[in-house]
Amino acid sequence: MSQPSARPSAVIVLAAGQGTRMKSTTPKIMHAIGGRSLVGHALAAAWSLAPEHLVAVVRHERARVAEHIETVAAQLGIDALAIADQDDVPGTGRAVELGLAALPADLEGTVVVTYGDVPLLTPETLARLVADHEADGNAVTVLTATLEDATGYGRIVRDAEGLVERIMEHKDALAHAESTGDDSFVAIREVNSGIYAFDAALLRRTLPEISTDNVQGEKYLTDVLGMARAEGGRVASVGTDDVWEVEGANDRRQLSDLGRQLNDRVLRGWMKEGVTVVDPSSTWVDVTVSLASDVTLKPGTQLHGTTSVATGAVVGPDSTLTDTQVGEGAVVKRTDATEAVIGAGATVGPFTYLRPGTVLGEDGKIGAFYETKNVTVGRGAKLSHLGYAGDAEIGEYTNIGCGNITANYDGVAKHRTVIGAHVRTGSNTVFTAPVSVGDGAYTGAGAVVRDDVPAGALALNAVSQRTLEGWVPAKRPGTSSA
């Protein structure tokens, strides 16, 4: 047995399952909750232990899953990842054997085994598993939980000293009860989570010797426990009182339940940090989101990706922000924003659509029924209602009138509109790009701006109004207007 270390030598994440109960073309471990795939959560928890090596064992849709795992690993800053392929021999014992083969042959110390579909397992529980394993000099340490309904789980069978004697798989427990009439194993409620800490040398000795002589015809990883005891090794357990930590997602219902549990935990965590969540039941925040104290999230708010919200900002109701930065004291209501920046003290909404590349300066405003894309709006500028701004730069303290649009697309290419500072535009102005408007200029109502407007100028389309008296009774007789 190696000496205790500050971190495990390796973590092996089992991610080879097909997940047929999901009834999906997407591999099970790539389904997401809380802004991260199931395997992404597993990798994040594993990497929190700072292992020397991290191995993911894959099989179903190998290329797609491996690419996803490598992408997630890069996002998490994992720089010690190996991908191992499970072969046709079934069972967790074989999966770990192949994962171990991807590690250095002389590896010593603790090897943690976990699963790619257990998203609520916390870094704290994993750290406790490793700490107890090494402090007690165990050959194997099992993470266990006690369930009301243990159907489908392997049962923890203990010896007279309270140590783990073996783990009996659910189907084997049922088979034993049917053949002997003894249902004591079926009645056990303490179950195996499938998450372990092993001595590396023990795994290297025992995994090749595991048999497939069982009801399922698989190489059970649990057989290592009996083999360790036969060598005189100590097999113990660490329990968790939080059964959600060991719950896997095998179908859409379980995925939904785990998503709700994760979201509740995320929200509780932020509320402890000084965030007001008016209605947790309708508020969803990804694990990758960052919130400051005194932020208020109103009902119907969804925050996704790398969204960050600064002190004193109010988001909601009914707002969805993805990869968006919200500045201090800003107010965002009934808004859908993606890859946008909302400055301090700015106001957005209601019914506003901020598309990628939108940057709203401090104290600026993008109001009701406005759509923006790839636009920079200067400090204090206002786009108050009913318009579209795309591929544009709008200077500070400019006021864009109701119904203004930048006509940026000619059917082939996009063109840019540049509007200076302190500009005032009349209602229903159309800027036909490429075009620029100088500082302090004005446009008249209904203007179609096709040519550049100098600073301080007024742009009008000089079409005199024509009034035809008596036209209605002559042309529309018999109508209510006549």
Image (cartoon, rainbow, N blue to C red):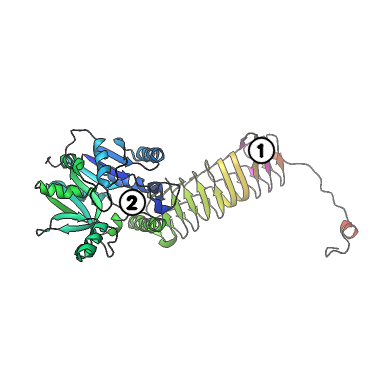
Image quarter of residue 43: top left
Q: Position of residue 115 (x, y in %)?
A: 30, 48
Label disc, if present, on residue 37 of the rendered structure = none
Q: Measuring 58% from the left and 47% from the top, which residue is drawn there?
A: 371
Q: Measuring 19% from the left and 64% from the top, which residue is drawn there?
A: 180
Q: Nearer the viewer, residue 101 or 42?
A: 101
Q: Are marks 2 and 1 in contact (CB under 8 Å)?
A: no
Secondary element under disc 2, as helix, strand or loop, is loop
Q: Nearer the viewer, residue 379 or 358?
A: 358
Task: Examine the structure image and report whether residue 315 is included in the region drawn in magenta.
Answer: no
Q: Nearer the viewer, residue 129 or 235?
A: 235
**Quarter the C terminus occupies:** bottom right
Task: Examine the structure image and report whether residue 423 is included in the region drawn in magenta.
Answer: yes
Q: Nearer the viewer, residue 68 or 292?
A: 68
Residue found farthest to the front: 179
Residue type (three-letter) at the residue carrying disc 1? Gly
Residue type (three-letter) at the residue carrying disc 2? Pro
Residue holding disc 2: 119
Secondary element under disc 1, as helix, strand or loop, is loop
Q: Measuring 18% from the left and 42% from the top, which residue is drawn there?
A: 209
Q: Which residue range is magenta in the image?
A: 416-438
Report whether residue 33 is seen.
no
- How many neighbours does mark 2 have within 10 angstroms: few (below 14), some (14-19), or many (20 or more)? many
Q: Position of residue 211 (x, y in %)?
A: 21, 46
> Mark 2 or 1 closer to N-term?
2
Residue found farthest to the right: 474
Q: CA distance from mark 2 to mark 1?
A: 60 Å
Residue holding disc 1: 456
Q: Position of residue 309 (x, y in %)?
A: 42, 49
Number of numbered discs present? 2
